[in-house]
Structures are given as C-alpha cells and as structure tokens.
Amino acid sequence: MTAPSPEVSAPHQAAAPPTPPPSMRLRELVFGAACAAAVRAAARLGVADALGDAPMTAEGLAAAVHTEPKPLRRLLRALSCYGVFTERPDGSFAHTEMSRLLREDDPNSLRAIAMWCTEPWTWDAWPRLDEAVRTGKNVVEDLYGKEFFDYLNEDAPESADVFNRAMTRSSEQSAREVAALLDLSGSRSVADLGGGQGHVVACLLDKYPAMRGSLLDLPRVVENALPRLREGGDLADRMRIVPGDIRESVPVEADVYIIKNILEWDDESTTRLLGNVVEAGGPGARVVVIENLVDDTPSMRFSTAMDLLLLLNVGGAKHTTDSMVARLTAAGLTVGDIRPVNPFLHAFDCTVSV
C-alpha cells in the first residue's frame, strides 16, 4: 500500500499567517506605545482579574470593571492582536497564557512589572532617548531636577510604591530559582547585598538549615524585610539585618556574597560597590553575581529595552557576558561558571582573587 500524499494526510492543517512586509512591521513598531498603554490600561482596570475561566462579553466585563462597553471592546481587541486575551467567534473574550499573567493572584503575575514599565515618568523620558544616546547621560535629572530615586520617593510616591511592589514580586519569583541553582554546601554564611526584603537569603536559609545569613540594603528598605527574617520570625535567630549603602561600604563578613540586579548603575557606583565587596570578603571569598544580559538570546527584546530604560533614568546599563566578565575581573574577582538562572537571568560564580 502506498503512503497517502501530504495533501491527503493533512487536509485540515491551517496555513501559517503570512509574515507582514517590512513596511507594515515598521508601522506596527512605531505604534508600540499603543500596545504598552493598552497593557497598562488593562492592568489598572483589573480586566484580567474580572475575567475568570469562562469567557465573558465586553458588556459583562465592562460592568465588572466599571467602564463603557464599546471602548473596552476596542481595548481588548487591540490586546488580542498580541495574544493578550483572545476574541472568540461569538464576540466574547477569554484568557490566554499571557493575559493570566496580568491577574494579581497568579503565582507568576507580571501585573506589577507591567505597571512599573509604563509608569507616567516613562512617558516623559522615552521621547528624549536620542538625547540620552547623544550624551550618554540620564534625562531624569533634567526633567525633574533631581536624581531618579530621589524623584520617586519625594515627588512620585505612587510610582515608588509600584516600583517596590514590582521588585518584590520579581524577587519572590526569581529567589526560588536562584536558591535551586546555587550549591552552597560547606558554606557557613551568606550575605545578600542590596537584597531588598531578603527573598533570596530566606530561600537559601530554608535550603541550608545550618547556614547563617545577612541582609544589607538601605535603611528604608530593610525596615520592610520579610517578617520571617525579623525579630520573632522563624529565621530571625540565623539572620543579621544590616542597614547601609553597599556603594559606600560592606560591613558584613560571609563565606558567600550574593549580588543580584544591582550592577547596572553608573560605572563609578558599580566600581565602588565591587571594590567594597572584594575588601569585605578577602581572598578566596565566593561572590555570586546575578544579572540580566543583553546578549542572552531568550530575552533579548526585554533585556535591551530595560537597558535603554536604565540609560534614561539612572544613566546605567545592562551588560553583555564579555563586559560583565571584564568588569568583575578588573575588580579583583576570578570568574568561574556562568550559568542561566532562568530565561532572563545569568549567574556569574566568582571568587576574590588571592
């Protein structure tokens, strides 16, 4: 018996949608702000939270989130073009894998990140990207008359709150992956430098019951450290919480130092920080640096966009693998293994050179 021809064996295969021509793709790109604004609007309105497992009409969703039905349908239709929600043949809307990530209760929720990346200050800063590229300097100080985090905390408390929630959620999600990746067997102590509320060190103390930990960050940050790490918490007897600025000094002794997502400020601050870690640890100390890279293929679009945003707000930069290795080596660290933590983070396992 002869095999059926391809035409006979797969009569119902849908043809792949045609790739848009360059002229249309560029038109789509220059309207990228509309897509970002649509995601932000859906997040602020709580559309993903209102939509459950069953599809809903635009009218039903509008009643749930207190909007007009027709504009909401237009918003959802625009988002469905990017795979955020899907419009069904009967005109109702249902969740997709991406739209579920805008739910506040999703364990992998990106709602806070979506809000942070589209906060009002970003709309002031992006149009001045050419200026930042021309000068190599941030634009926020000219826009608001002060450094970025001073502006956030003093003049934009709502944005500061969004930032804190976004960083907390991001840390919660990646801390488990960091702890799973790192083998700290034989180490007696670990220090989480610039570690925010301490999600990474908490996960590591859970993994290694005999280990002691330290958390060093700005005073206003460590005041809100995880309850588990503070007095009365189940990890408190193995924890030391140290308020301070790692760019000024690292008054912590440990076998292992963790530095995650903070080597992206201006060059002077980064050089000072690494010097402080090397001095605190001394020869042979282990230093694990965890960062986004702009040459790690799975997250190139995300990482390069964040790189440009860092240029705009603090004059900082994400690194390539080579530039990170060069920076760490110049600081007196010997770089060993470089491994992915997840699709957008890499860990550089280093020791202080003898």
Image: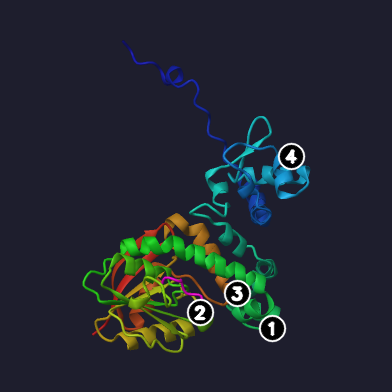
Image coords of residue 352 (percent x, y): 28, 81
Left or right side of 300 for 135? right
Q: Secondary structure at mark 2?
A: loop
Q: Nearer the viewer, residue 232 or 348?
A: 232
Of all residues, the one furthest to the top in this rendering is 1
Alpha carbon of mark 2 to alpha carbon of mark 4: how far?
A: 45 Å
Task: Report whether 223 appears left or right of 289.
Answer: right
* Residue beneath disc 1: 145
**Quadrant containing the C terminus in the rendered view:** bottom left
Residue 62 picture location, percent across and down: 73, 45
Q: State the residue position of label 2.
A: 223
Asked if labels 4 and 2 touch by Cβ distance under 8 angstroms, the answer is no
Of tags 1 and 2, the one toward the viewer is: 2
- Quadrant that contains the N terminus: top left
Whether 138 is drawn above or below 248: the answer is above
- Calculate the distance from the C-alpha at mark 4 to the C-alpha at mark 3: 40 Å
What is the image's colouring? Answer: rainbow
Label 3 sits on residue: 313
Q: Which of the pair 73/60 is nearer the observer?
A: 60
Gap between marks 4 and 1, in whole Å? 45 Å
* Mark 4 vs mark 1: in front: 4
Please provide the residue range marked out in magenta: 223-228
N-terminal label among 4 and 3: 4
Give SS at disc 1.
loop
- Which one is earlier in the sequence, the residue at label 3 or at label 1? 1
**Residue lying farthest to the left in this orientation:** 186
Q: Amino acid at mark 3?
A: Asn
Residue positioned 50% across, 82% down in the render: 218
Which residue is labeled 4 in the image?
59
Mark 3 touching mark 1, by CB under 8 A? no
Lower position in the chain sequence, tag 2 or tag 4: 4
